[in-house]
Amino acid sequence: MSLTIRLTGTGGAQLVPVFGCDCPACRRARVDEAHRRRPCSAVVKFNNAVTLLDAGLPDLMTQWPAGSFQQFLLTHYHMDHVQGLFPLRWGVGEPIAVYGPPDEQGCDDLFKHPGLLDFSHTVEPFVRFELQGLRVTPLPLNHSRLTFGYLLESAHSRVAWLSDTAALPEKTLKFLLNNQPQLIIIDCSHEPRPQPPRNHCDLNTVRAINHIIGCPRVILTHISHRFDAWMMENALPAGFEAGFDGMEIALD
C-alpha cells in the first residue's frame, strides 16, 4: 500500500509574493517561482485513490480534470480553502463527494447551488471514517470558524494535517499524544512572536505543540511572506522544515 502527500499550496490567503510588497521574500518569489506560495492545500494519494485536501486553487479544474480524483476533504469554508469549487460545481458528470465539517453556513452560495458537488458527507470530531481504505479522523482546530484537521492512517503510516489553527484544543492535543503521528503538517503562518497570534500559529507555538507530541518530523505550511523573510535570515530547529509548493512526501 502506498500513501503520498503532495503540497499543492503552502501559503495563506495573502499568498507569496504579496501584492504591492517589496520585502526580501516577495522580491525573491517574483523572480523565482520555486519560492511562490499558493493557497494552502494538498493532494493525498492512497493506492489508486486521490483526495484533494482543500480546494483553494483558483485553477483547480485545470489541474484536476474530471475523473482524476475521487473526493474533496475540506478543513473549513474560508474562501482561500474553497474558491476552486465555485466554477467546478457547474460542470457535468457524476456527483463529487465533499467531506468536511458540519458548517451550516458554508461559503457564499455553495450550499444553495451545489451543482455536481455533494456536501452531504459531513464529518464529526474524532469519529473515524474511511476513504478507499485510508482511515481519516477529524480533529477540531482553533480558528475563526469551524475547522477540522485530520489524522490520516494507512497500515504503516500516520500523518496529522493541522491547518488552519492557532495552537491546538486540549482534546486534539491529547488525541495526538495518544496516537503518535510520524509526520505533522501544520499551520505556521508567523515568525516567532512575543505573544501567540490569533487564528494562526507562529513558530514558538508550533515548537510548544511538538514539545508535547514529540513528532520526529514537522513540516510547516500556510506560510506568510514575513515568515519567509525571517527564514531567509534564521534556521529552523532540528526536525522542522518549511513546506514548499510541489513538495512530495512518500510515507509507505
Image (tube, rainbow, N blue to C red):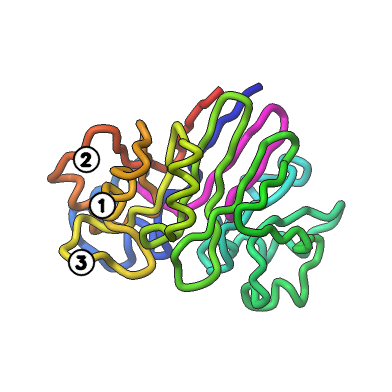
Q: Is residue 41 magenta?
A: yes
The amino acid type found where label 1 is placed reads: Leu
Question: Is residue 45 inside the magenta stretch?
Answer: yes
Image: magenta residue range? 35-54
Query: Which residue bears the numbered disc 1?
Result: 203
How many angstroms separate mark 2 from mark 3 (CA)?
19 Å
Q: Provide the residue designation for mark 2.
A: 236
Question: Is the C-beta separation of discs 1 and 3 under 8 Å?
Answer: no
Task: Tell me the tag on residue 93.
Answer: none
Residue sitting nearer the eye, 30 or 35: 35
Tell me the element at label 2.
loop
- Front residue of 190 and 15: 190
Q: CA distance from mark 1 to mark 3?
A: 11 Å
Q: Which residue is mark 3?
A: 195
Q: Nearer the viewer, residue 139 or 70?
A: 139
Is 186 positioned to the left or the right of 3 in the image? left
Instruction: Tell me the CA gap for discs 1 and 2.
Output: 9 Å
